[in-house]
Image (spheres, helix red, strand yellow):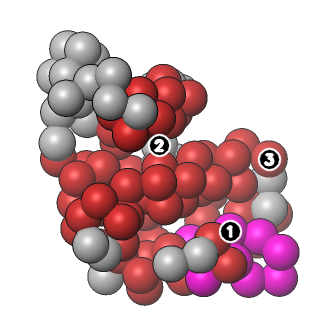
Amino acid sequence: MGLTQYFDNGLFAPRKIAATFQTTSEEVARTAGLGKDAIQRKDRVRSDRTQRRLRELVEIINKVEARFGSALMAYAWYRSEPLPGFSGMTAMQLVRSGRADEVLEYIDAVDAGVHA
């Protein structure tokens, strides 16, 4: 699916992301490394930090969705599959620690055949 399914009024919308992943907005916030407050207060949802974390989550899911057949399965991978070369950390753990770029680079490397 496209990125626009996660948008509302030009912003990443936690409730739309949650609906796609069949979870709650609070869980989406947690998996993106955000507090509940970040998705409950309108000013916080619009903040650069919140939007960046939601964008990183969505970019990663979007990149691997075709591989897993659905956004829901890609989200499960994001939360639970340890990535080789990252000391057993999952994509979610890496994103929560500010390392989303490394996850995206890893996915690109796998897609290019560098990692098997």
To which quarter of the image does residue 70 belong? bottom left
- Image position of 16 with respect to 86: above or below: below
Taking the spot 49% from the left edge, 61% from the top edge, the residue there is 62
Q: Secondary structure at mark 3?
A: helix
To which quarter of the image does residue 7 belong? bottom right
Residues packed near mark 1 inside 10 Å, few (<14), some (14 to 19) or many (20 plus): many
Whichever of callouts 1 and 2 sits on the residue coming sooner in the sequence is: 1
Three-letter residue code for mark 3: Asp
Q: Which residue is mark 3?
A: 48
Three-letter residue code for mark 2: Gly
Q: Which residue is mark 1?
A: 12
Let me know if residue 48 appears in the view. Answer: yes
Disc 3 and disc 1: Cα gap in Å? 11 Å
Let me know if residue 23 appears in the view. Answer: no
- The answer to the question of whether label 3 and label 2 lie on touching residues, with beta carbons closer than 8 A, is no
Disc number lying in front (1 or 2): 1
State the extent of the magenta-drawn residues as a range: 5-14
Disc 3 and disc 2: Cα gap in Å? 14 Å
Three-letter residue code for mark 1: Phe
* Magenta region includes residue 10: yes
**Observer-nearest of 19 and 77:** 77
Taking the spot 55% from the left edge, 53% from the top edge, the residue there is 59
- Image position of 51 with respect to 49: above or below: below
Q: Secondary structure at mark 1?
A: strand
* Image mark for residue 75: none
Q: Which residue is mark 2?
A: 33
Taking the spot 47% from the left edge, 43% from the top edge, the residue there is 33
Residue 55 x %, y %: 63, 54
